[in-house]
Amino acid sequence: MKKLFALCLIGLSFYPIYAQKTTELPMPPEFAKAITKGTRTTNGFPGKNYWQNHSDYQIKASLDPATRILKGTETIVYYNQSPDELTQLVLRLYPDIFKRGFQDDGSQGIAEADKNETGVLLSKVLLNGKPAKTQRKGTNLFLPLAQNLLPNSQITLEIDWQYTLPKTTHIREGTYFNTSFMVAYWYPQMAVYDDIDGWDELDYTGQQEFYNDFSNFDVEITMPNSHLVWATGVWQNPDEILKTEISDRYRKALNSDEVIKIVTKEDHKKGILTLGKENNTFRYKAANVPDFAFSASDTYLWDMASVVVDDSTKRRTVVGAVYHPSSRDFREVTSYARQCLNYFSHTLPGVPFPYPSLTVFNGDGGMEFPMMVNDGSFGDEQAAEVTAHEIAHTYFPFYMGINERKYAWMDEGFAQFLPNDMEFFINERTFKPQQDNAEWFIGFISRANDAPLMMPSYKLSSDVYTISAYIRPSQAYAG
């Protein structure tokens, strides 16, 4: 932890390094106010009065592969650990980005066919068992409170909802090969209330990513018996779902240093991989994580292994790859992922990988979630690089709780820098990521659209965002 914290302090020091010629370091007034309150400091440490809110989620959801309709019901217990009386609650309805007429930032190219009239359809919203007043604006849901939520108290929300997963648009989630799915940004989620900005009311417009409380999840996902489900957390009931021979391989892989093929082409040829029920309910639990995502497929292959991430306790993390049979580069991804966890845990940053499992799903692009990764198939040349980058995000932003909506450079820059030496190690080809980054940076710096590092990420777009979030900070981390 000391090594990781040192890196955080290095990152926080970039701004004052360039401001040493001034007599006083400029400071946003909201941050100065937090210092006065004792929740923040100027040295990167939390203040003596620092606090965070959190939630407990219980979610039951079903996904119909034919219609792509996801239906869910959730109970959220929200804990107000702040010293403030809250007059409202704010939740995020991410799929409202697909609602016709919503002004996204254009960065993701939403297909017209994926737009709809309703976005997230809410059929029930209760606060402490009573119907709630609701106000929707952009991708946020506002719930005014009849009585203020007092400090050190809690409130229970019950929400029923549904929406249709996009068919052709892939904004970190989507439908692949018609019957395989990566499902993210999918449930009504509590927004963050913090000591700097109060409620985070920024709309989700397609580019900005994570800023979430650390919360606990107990999730049940029901699908037809043709599909398997992989998700954030620890799978609670594999023996209730998998056929015996598949279950035996799964159990063996939990403690195996060698990659074990859990589901093969031959298994698919034989037919159903699960026991004889018409539908299966997969249950996953995750503690103290900022988000929950899941994937599902009826055609993908599945490899698994594990690796010791903590020498003192011998704790292992299970790693796996779930991929389309045509994605030849994914045959090595479980091995790459295993080596990533070993390197990150024991070399740089030298902090044991914090989660019990990690699954790399073969979808599109490159996107991280707690214990889940959504990666496209890029061929052997980039498989190691993309795998390493997305797994590195486990530390930044997930482990450190970074506000990526405002300061994407803190986690994207770290994830761009951290795997450099390791990528050489796991891939023998000629690969020069740091040199490539430097050449790109040199060609961009000091131009008219070169933005300061501390410019809020939600204000940036296109190449300006890429340079500010990825390239510039990775060069600074590399020294």
Image: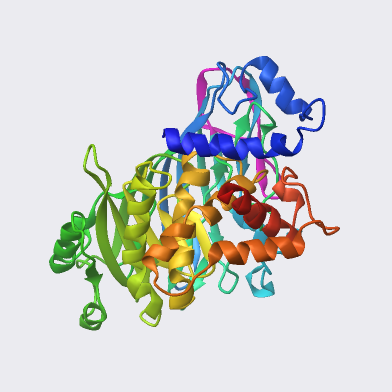
State the count of labels. Answer: 0
* Residue 234: image location, x then y, percent: 30, 48
Please give left or right for residue 463 compared with residue 95 in the image: right
Per the image, is 138 magenta? Answer: yes
Q: Quadrant of residue 126?
A: top right
* Residue 358: image location, x then y, percent: 36, 55
Residue at the (65%, 43%) spot, across then down? 141
Residue at the (52%, 64%) spot, across then down? 366
Examine the rendered structure and indicate whether residue 187 appears above or below residue 76: below
Residue at the (56%, 24%) spot, across then down? 46
Q: Quadrant of residue 455?
A: top right
- In the rendered view of the protein, which quadrant contains the N terminus? top left
Examine the rendered structure and indicate whether residue 346 appears above or below residue 376: above
Q: Is residue 105 visible?
A: no
Examine the rendered structure and indicate whether residue 283 appears above or below residue 250: above
Q: Quadrant of residue 270?
A: bottom left
Q: Is residue 454 visible?
A: yes
Please give left or right for residue 339 compared with residue 449 in the image: left
**Residue in front for this viewpoint, 208 or 477:** 477
Q: Which residues are magenta?
A: 127-155
Magenta span: chief secondary structure = strand
Residue at the (68%, 65%) spot, across then down? 440
**Residue in front for this viewpoint, 281 or 331:** 331
Per the image, is 121 magenta? Answer: no
* Residue 17: image location, x then y, percent: 70, 37
* Residue 177: image location, x then y, percent: 46, 78
**Residue in front for this viewpoint, 247 or 413:** 413
The colour scheme of the drawn protein is rainbow
